[in-house]
Amino acid sequence: MNLPDELYACVCAREFPAQALLRLRPELRPRACVVMEGEPPLQQVCAMTEQARTIGVAYSMTKVEVETFPNLAVLSRSPQEESATRAVLLECAGSFSPRVEECSQDRTFGCVLDISGTELLFGPPQRLARNLRDRIEALGIAAFVAVCRNYHAAIVLAAGLSAHRPVSVVATGQQSAALAPLPVSVLDLTDEQQETFALWGITTLGQLAELPQRELIARLGQDGHRLRQLARGEKPHLFQPIEPPFVLSERMELDTSVELLDSLLFVIGAMLDQLIQRAHTRILALAAVTVTLSLDGGATHIRTVRPALPTCDKQLWIRLLHLDLEAHPPPAAIVAIALRAEPGKTDKVQLGLFSPQLPEPSRLDVTLARIRALVGDGNAGRAVLRDTHAPEGFRMEAFALTVAQHSTKPADTPPSSSRMAMRRLRPSERASVVLQHEKPASFAFRERRYTVERAYGPWDASGDWWNPSLWGTEEWDLVAHAQDGSLLCCLMTRAPAQNLWEVTALYD
């Protein structure tokens, strides 16, 4: 079995500190922007956009010099946002090839994909390179892609591409000719090597490749041999792939602290666009979103929103997050935002031709979110019994669809029969009781006097003697009549410790 020939695709994103910040700030992309690094007042320009370079901004300019340019947006370098963007790009590259190696430098992101044998899946190299660049552009990053048979030649070619030619595919055996017109500055040269080549009159890689190997090694040592191999596209490489994890997370540090919820949702909307775009590439949806707000003073405010079904509807997520943050606002100004999403699969429901249309799950999610905002998180959902006989022995939990509810087999329903219904009173209402032979004979309830006709009980229960929340109760089922002849059937309890009588339920 013959192994496929080597074929590499290199992704190069220049001015990476600036692109990482502008990815989640689309409103600043058309403007001239610079990125400063260092401690005040010694900050210097480390990255910039093409618009800033056009008006004369240069690297290492101080903040005082930068402020002389009008309409120039100044941003601070963020290692956290660069790390998050780097993970996003490696994840995107991993969707085209499982073998990816990073080759980033200080101001440039770079990675190389081993795409040998991918023609049947992604088509010819030209199509793969265009699709890869389009996918990266959809993430908000401007990148260049070069495809070549040699690993190092692909990196050098990607570094020499321009906006007029963002994609380059070199045919087999043509890497030396493709590298020849590029300037020697695309190589990682030291200041001494640059000065030496300038004195020799070597300005292109073609001129460097034509230098005699023996004399070049005699003057520059093994570095000369390495540079000549790079210029000819012949340097070998041992590929060392990495395995980037798939994590749906985004982080953004705000330029100024934010207190208004509307401004916060505007930023969250841009981050949701990225999360949804990344989930779409893997045919997934967002099952839950956790918002982590870094507050002024060092505290954090964390909220998690989980709808009934995974979805990629951005407007639905905005409404749910808006209602949740409105009900649980952060206690201080916000200086940074982080979103982390759990991936999930969207269920598809196929209805019959004459089946009634089901309500949209998104509307139910929004309605429940509004109810929770009014009554509180722990007061909306479904009741689940606890393993106890104590009064009010239940808890509330969120609505969730179980596997049994997705079954198409109709459930066996018992025959309908009339039954007495019991309505719980929350909270219980106090009653004044008169006993006769240790049984309730009459009582006052809701400003009316009732005479007991039949009394069933008492049923005594107690528990949790090992906990501080020791409880005990005495229950009576009573049938009583008022003076006007009205009938009342109720459940009445007495706390033995306090001798407190309360009506806890009414029978209909």
Image (cartoon, grey):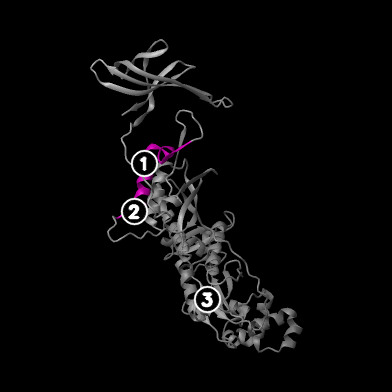
Question: Which residue is disc 3 drawn over?
Answer: 145
Name the residue: 48% across, 63% down.
278
Q: Where residue 410 sits: x, y (%)? A: 37, 51
Along the polypeptide, which appears first: circle 1 or circle 2? 2
Observer-nearest residue: 327 or 44?
A: 327
Question: How many C-alpha atoms fall within 10 Å of the one at disc 3: few (<14), some, or many (≥20)?
Answer: many
Amino acid at circle 1: Ile
Question: How many C-alpha atoms fall within 10 Å of the one at disc 2: few (<14), some, or many (≥20)?
Answer: few
Could you give the CA–CA distance between mark 1 and mark 2, rounded to whole angstroms?
Answer: 17 Å
Q: Looking at the image, do the residues carrying marks 3 and 1 touch, with CB atoms under 8 Å apart? A: no
**Residue 360 — which label?**
2
**SS state under label 2:** loop
- Farthest residue in the front direction? 415
Amino acid at circle 2: Glu
Mark nearer the viewer, 1 or 2: 2
Q: Where residue 420 sits: x, y (%)? A: 33, 31
Name the residue: 57% across, 79% down.
117
Along the polypeptide, which appears first: circle 3 or circle 1? 3
- Farthest residue in the left direction? 484
**Residue 371 — which label?**
1
**SS state under label 1:** helix
Q: Where residue 285 sits: x, y (%)? A: 45, 59
Residue 422, above or below 107: above
Looking at the magenta stretch, what is its main secondary structure? helix
Is residue 407 visible in the rendered structure shown here?
yes
Magenta span of residues: 357-385
Amino acid at circle 3: Val
Could you give the CA–CA distance between mark 3 and mark 1, rounded to whole angstroms?
Answer: 51 Å
Name the residue: 43% across, 50% down.
401
**SS state under label 3:** strand
Observer-nearest residue: 36 or 227?
A: 227
Along the polypeptide, which appears first: circle 2 or circle 3? 3
